[in-house]
């Protein structure tokens, strides 16, 4: 029983209630009804907001489905175009087969025509021999009867007849000869025309095969995307259906709530009129209101359950999508393997075509004599020089061919050796100029390609080393094997060309360093200064700089010290894969380390928020990581000296800066920093908490007075980040035997002959 019941029950047995008590009970009932009304209105407002949110989600889903439909139509158009291209491939194969059959028919026709010509020549020779026999018989008859005397007229007529016969035979022979010559010229022209057509068709076949490869790759990609689209559509349709169901439920509940509110309003009005008579009904209505509240709560729980189920379905859909994506990736890998098999089959067919062509050429030309021992030289025709430069320099990609490091340089030097062996100065000069021009063109066309610049820096260095190792000079032949000593140049001195290749290598090196610097400069400040790898430092900033953003890189991807190491490791592995000489690798790493140290120190000098004890600890920690990376790559020697100014600046930020002993330690330890840099760091020093103090001006003046007496003190504040160390090319002889070097078939150098 409630408190209200306790107060009301005694009055039922007593006398009739007064007007004041009835007025108080009606006021209490009205207040309760107003509170219930406000609660219902709040619940209705919440449901309206939920309805609006669901409508917005529905609009977003509809927009997403329209975009996916547009993408699907675009993909279908591309698939149609690709199918058209694929249908054209069998026709090209048929054309190639028809051309091959035509070539075989022409060969048979040429053989038949040659046999007919031989038969005609034999007939003509037989006729001429018969004529000679008749003349011999006539002469023999005249010699048998020398005493017989003929008339002069008969002899002259016979002689004239013989002359006419000989002239007729000569004219006939001349006409036949001219006819045969014209036929031979026509046949040669026809053969040349057929060869040109065959070359054009082969070129067209190669182009169409490349188009076919690209089309097949695009088809595979589109198939994977198309297979994912139906699942996405199905998921969207399910989500839309769930959304529609939720909207219908919400609308029904809102309508139901509205009806209940209206009904309650009517009941309240009716209760106001009949408060005195229907107190029990008011209590019953209260119970009904409580029951309705429970129903509303139950409905809310049901709504939460529906939303939870919806989330579960979404999670299940995501899981199915991830499984489908993994399956599609597996199928994509299978398709790639099939494409690789087709590529290998195409290469095999091309090799068979080349072997057939070489066999036909071998049938037409006498076979060269085969020697059992190679001399480490490559022979080529003068007209194939442009093809050699095109395949070995201009078209060669670092990742396109699997070959040993420095092979391109060794192949070119073997061609140089053969020109020297033939004592052909014009051919040697033309080849050297073509090599230099080709390398210059490659590095000019790919000025920002780090991998290509690394590849040709290594090969240019190897060409320079080969010109020294096989020059015949004693200082470069000390480590040569007996066989390598025999392979030295014999007729020409190429010392002038060594200087040209050295200048070319210096040019490639500076371009190579510039490409690395462009990539590293945006990473140095975020990695070395702004990234906090030590614990409990990231939340502490110097006093007075707490609202300042860290740098311009704040909105970009977060860079850590490990991002810098990853980029440096990529550079080092690329240089190692290309067989770059170890000393040259050390010089490149030394230049990049100088850039890291100089750019970091310049930013410390420019930014007060970087001049603190905690920041000095962070910088020293990052330098330790960098030193560990250099030790791992065996590159510490000569490289850590470039980081000494930065190490001393980090030490200066951490050391005490109060007593005279501190002044002495600073002047002794900061030998790589200029007096201007030391004073700038001390003036910019900013404490990170209340326990530290700024550097006293008197302390700075004392240090400044001592540093003025330092010998060779520089007045330069900022370091020159564009400074370049002088590059040198140490001579390192190669142990590779040129006579054992084999040419990969993928280089397409079939026109070269190993000597």
Image (cartoon, rainbow, N blue to C red):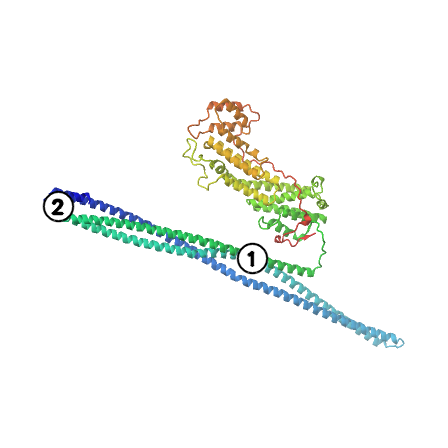
Q: Position of residue 56 (x, y in %)?
A: 34, 50
Element under disc 1: helix
Looking at the image, which residue sits at the far right?
147
Q: Position of residue 486 (x, y in %)?
A: 72, 46
Question: Which residue has dot 2 on it?
Answer: 12
Q: Position of residue 491 (x, y in %)?
A: 73, 45
Q: Position of residue 50 (x, y in %)?
A: 31, 49
Name which residue lies at 59% across and 47% down.
Answer: 442
Nearest to viewer (mark 2 / mark 1): 2
- Residue 430 seen in the figure: no
Residue 347's place in the image compared with 733, above or below, is below
- Of residue 164 and residue 343, the one placed in the foreground of this image is 343
Is the residue under label 1 in contact with that under label 2 (CB below 8 Å)?
Answer: no
Q: Earlier in the sequence, mark 2 or mark 1?
A: 2
Q: Which mark is residue 341?
A: 1
Q: Is residue 345 toward the left or the right of residue 538 in the image?
A: right
Q: Which mark is residue 662?
A: none
Looking at the image, which residue sits at the far left?
15
Residue 62's place in the image compared with 170, above or below, is above
Q: Is residue 127 toward the left or the right of residue 289 in the image?
A: right
- Residue 152 seen in the figure: yes
* Location of residue 709 by image quarter: top right
């Amino acid at each position: 029983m409630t408190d209200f019941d306790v107060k009301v029950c005694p009055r039922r047995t007593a006398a009739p209630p007064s007007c004041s008590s009835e007025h108080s009970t009606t006021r209490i009932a009205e207040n309760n009804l107003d509170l219930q009304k406000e609660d219902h209105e709040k619940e209705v407002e919440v449901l309206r907001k939920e309805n609006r949110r669901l409508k917005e989600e529905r609009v977003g889903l509809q927009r997403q489905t329209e975009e996916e439909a547009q993408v699907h139509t675009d993909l279908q158009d591309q698939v149609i175009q690709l199918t058209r291209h694929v249908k054209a491939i069998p026709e090209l194969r048929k054309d190639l087969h028809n051309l091959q059959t035509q070539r075989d028919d022409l060969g048979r026709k040429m053989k038949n025509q040659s046999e007919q010509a031989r038969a005609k020549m034999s007939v003509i020779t037989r006729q001429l021999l018969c004529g000679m026999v008749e003349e011999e018989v006539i002469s023999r008859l005249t010699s048998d009867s020398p005493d017989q005397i003929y008339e002069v007229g008969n002899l002259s007529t016979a002689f004239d007849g013989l002359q006419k016969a000989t002239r007729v035979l000569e004219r006939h022979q001349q006409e036949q000869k001219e006819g045969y010559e014209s036929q031979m010229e026509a046949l040669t022209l026809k053969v040349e025309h057929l060869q040109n057509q065959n070359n054009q068709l082969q070129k067209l076949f190669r182009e169409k095969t490349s188009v076919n490869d690209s089309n097949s790759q695009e088809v595979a990609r589109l198939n994977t995307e198309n297979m994912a689209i139906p699942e996405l559509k199905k998921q969207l349709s399910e989500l839309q259906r769930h959304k529609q169901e939720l909207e219908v439920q919400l609308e029904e509940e809102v309508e139901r709530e509205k009806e209940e509110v209206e009904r309650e309003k009517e009941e309240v009005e009716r209760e106001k009129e009949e408060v005195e008579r229907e107190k029990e009904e008011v209590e019953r209505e209260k119970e009904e209101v409580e029951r309705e509240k429970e129903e509303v709560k139950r409905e809310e729980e049901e709504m939460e359950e529906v939303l939870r189920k919806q989330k579960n379905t979404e999670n299940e859909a995501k899981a199915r999508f991830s499984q489908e994506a993994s399956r599609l990736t597996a199928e994509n890998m299978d398709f790639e393997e099939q494409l690789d098999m087709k590529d290998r089959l195409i290469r095999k067919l091309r090799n068979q075509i080349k072997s057939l062509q070489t066999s036909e050429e071998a049938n037409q030309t006498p076979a060269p004599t085969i020697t059992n021992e190679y001399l480490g030289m490559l022979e080529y025709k003068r007209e194939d020089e442009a093809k050699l430069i095109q395949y070995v320099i201009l078209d060669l990609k670092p990742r396109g061919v699997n070959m040993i490091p420095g092979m391109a340089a060794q192949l070119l030097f073997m061609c140089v050796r053969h020109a020297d062996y033939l004592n052909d100065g014009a051919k040697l000069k033309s080849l050297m100029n073509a090599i230099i021009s080709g390398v210059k063109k490659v590095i000019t066309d790919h000025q920002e390609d780090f991998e290509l610049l690394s590849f040709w820096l290594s090969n240019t260095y190897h060409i320079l080393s080969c010109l020294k190792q096989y020059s015949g000079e004693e200082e470069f032949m000390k480590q040569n094997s007996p066989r390598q000593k025999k392979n030295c140049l014999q007729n020409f001195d190429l010392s002038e060309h060594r200087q040209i290749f050295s200048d070319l290598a210096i040019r490639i090196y500076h371009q190579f360093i510039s490409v690395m610097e462009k990539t590293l400069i945006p990473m140095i400040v975020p990695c070395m200064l702004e990234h906090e790898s030590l614990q409990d430092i990231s939340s502490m900033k110097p006093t007075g700089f707490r609202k300042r953003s860290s740098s311009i890189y704040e909105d970009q991807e977060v860079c850590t010290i490990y991002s810098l190491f990853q980029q440096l490791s990529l550079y080092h592995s690329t240089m190692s894969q290309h067989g770059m000489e170890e000393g040259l690798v050390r010089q490149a790493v030394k230049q990049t380390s100088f850039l890291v140290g100089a750019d970091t120190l310049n930013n410390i000098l420019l930014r007060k928020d970087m001049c603190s004890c905690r920041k000095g600890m962070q910088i020293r920690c990052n330098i330790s990581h960098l030193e560990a990376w250099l030790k791992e790559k065996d590159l510490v020697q000569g490289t850590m000296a470039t980081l000494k100014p930065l190490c001393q600046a980090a030490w200066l930020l951490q050391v005490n800066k109060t007593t005279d002993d501190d002044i002495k330690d600073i002047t002794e330890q900061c030998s790589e920093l200029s007096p201007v840099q030391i004073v700038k760091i001390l003036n910019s020093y900013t404490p990170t908490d209340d326990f530290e103090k700024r550097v006293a001006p008197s302390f700075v003046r004392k240090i400044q007075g001592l540093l003025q007496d330092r010998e060779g003190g520089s007045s330069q504040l900022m370091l020159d980040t564009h400074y370049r160390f002088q590059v040198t090319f140490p001579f390192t002889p190669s142990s590779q035997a040129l006579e054992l070097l084999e040419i990969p078939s993928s280089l397409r150098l079939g026109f070269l002959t190993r000597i």
